[in-house]
Amino acid sequence: GGGSTGGGSAATPAKPETSTKPDGTKVETTTKPDGSSVTESKTPDGSTGTVKTDKNGQTTAETKLSAKALEDAKKNGEAVKAPVEVEASRNSSTAPTVSIELPKGAGETKVEIPVSNVKPGTVAVIVHPDGTEEIVKSSLPTENGIRLTVDGSATVKIVDNSKPFADTQNHWARDEVSFVAARELFNGIGNNLFGVSGEMTRGMVNTVLARLAGANTEGGAKWYDKGTEWAVQRGISDGTNPTAPVTREQLAAMLYRFAGAPAVSGALNFNDANAVSEYARSALLWATQNGILNGVGGNLAAPAALAERAQVAAMLARYLRSAG
């Protein structure tokens, strides 16, 4: 609008709109004539959230989570829901920024940030104190947002990092591929293709797991050297035959060791259970019990069959979801 109104009276301030959500959260939104807005939320358990959007649509949010909210969430085995909702954007420079503050001494806590347009390719990107940014590979899309583990306080951006590969559009593993590619655990093979049915080498799996753990896999005489070296040091792989294609049971064994080889009990109920190598039995049991590996039909584990890239992507996505 134009300047001051006649007679020196101030322009009418924007009147806040208030509402109460079903869970009892009180929300107050004030929108200014230039289109900018501020939304303040307070939950019944004392968490607060503020979302500010400027006239250009740039959003910054901050949330303080209460000790009671943390206590209740941990008791129910759930993530603490931050009372701020944002919309992910394709570009990190325009993405909404969310500052999360936990009570002192809270330690590692699972937090869910509501995202209005969440997809399998939506990621949280942590903004380090020095300004550098890093994708939180373990950030998980939920039905209504993105879930991640924070320690103390953190500032994150919410980015839609989906990679629309031409060969995954109608593929059964489309969402899983989008999930792992957005977290930059896998790259495409060029020409806008993921290479769904291509084989996966042992060196590739070593590299993907190393990336997942946050290791730097750049450098090395061969592209898979650093990842393989990392996997050998951690007892995930023996480092042999990095260019050989990985079998389903080898893949299960590598993921199982990556997960810390948790104790399992029970028997393999596949018709071809006797074809499973001794070293991979616990791993396959763990992978099937956690929904990471499914049979190939006819109740077969097909342990020696080669794992295609799409299958590896799906197993990795399922592993991250089960671990998260």
Image (tube, rainbow, N blue to C red):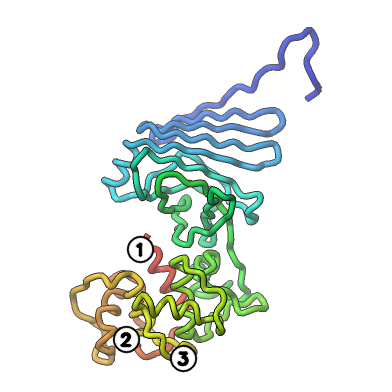
Q: Position of residue 63 (x, y in %)?
A: 47, 38
Q: Amino acid at mark 1?
A: Ala
Label 1, residues with CA under 10 Å away: few <14, some 14-19, many ≥20: few
First in residue order: circle 2 vs circle 3:
3
Which mark is in front, 2 or 3? 3
Q: Is residue 265 above or below residue 102?
A: below
Residue under circle 3? 244
Q: 236 left or right of 123?
A: left
Please give the residue where the numbered disc 1 appears in the rendered image.
Answer: 323
Q: Nearer the viewer, residue 235 or 164?
A: 235
Neighbor class of circle 2 (other Cα within 10 Å; few <14, some 14-19, many 20+) is some
Q: Which is closer to the viewer, label 1 or label 2?
A: 1
Q: Disc 2 designates what residue?
A: 300
Residue 157 badge? none
What secondary structure is found at the residue carrying circle 3?
loop
Q: CA distance from mark 1 to mark 2?
A: 25 Å
- Nearest the eye: 268 or 210: 210
Rendering coords of residue 272 (x, y %): 27, 90
Q: Is residue 51 above or below residue 229?
A: above
Residue count near mark 3 (Cα–Cα under 10 Å), binned few <14, some 14–19, many ≥20: few
Q: Residue at x 49, y 29 (%)?
A: 19
- Secondary structure, mark 2, is loop
Quadrant housing residue 322: bottom left
Q: Is residue 311 visible?
A: no
